[in-house]
Image (spheres, rainbow, N blue to C red):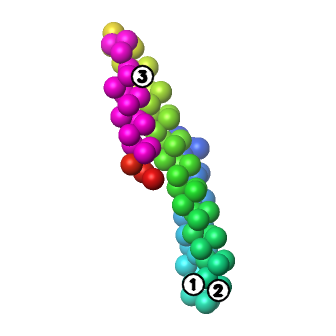
Amino acid sequence: MIYNDKSINRLKRAEGQIKGIMRMIEEGKDCKEVITQLSAARSAIDRAIAVIVSSNLEHCIRESIDAGNADSSKLVEEAVNMLVRSR
C-alpha cells in the first residue's frame, strides 16, 4: 500500500476539522454551523479515500503489468467498488 504525503495531509486536515467540531459542540455552537463543519469533514475524508484508492490502483496496475498480466480490469473494478462502498 502507498500512503503519500497528499493523503496524510488530507487526513490531518480532517482531523483538525473534527477537533474543531468537538470544540464547537462543547461551546454549544449553533446546529447549522456544526452540521456545515461535519459535512466539510466528511468531504475531506472522501477526498482522502479517493487519493488513496487512485494512487494504490495505479501502483497495483503497474505491478500487474510488470508481472506480465496485462488485464487490469479486475483491479479497476475492485477500486470502483471500494469508492462506491465508501459512500
**Residue type at tag 1:** Ile
Secondary element under disc 2, as helix, strand or loop, is loop
Q: CA distance from mark 2 to mark 3?
A: 47 Å
Q: Position of residue 67 (x, y in %)?
A: 33, 13
**Residue type at tag 3:** Ile
Residue name at image x 65 percent, y 85 percent: 30
Secondary element under disc 3, as helix, strand or loop, is helix
Front-most of residues 10 and 40: 40
Within-10-Å neighbours for mark 3: few <14, some 14–19, many 20+: some
Badge 2 or badge 3: first in the primary sequence: 2
Q: CA distance from mark 1 to mark 2?
A: 6 Å
Quadrant where the image shows the N terminus: top left
Q: Which residue is mark 3?
A: 61
Q: Which residue is mark 2?
A: 29
User: Which residue range is magenta in the image?
Assistant: 69-84
Asked whether residue 1 is in view, the answer is no
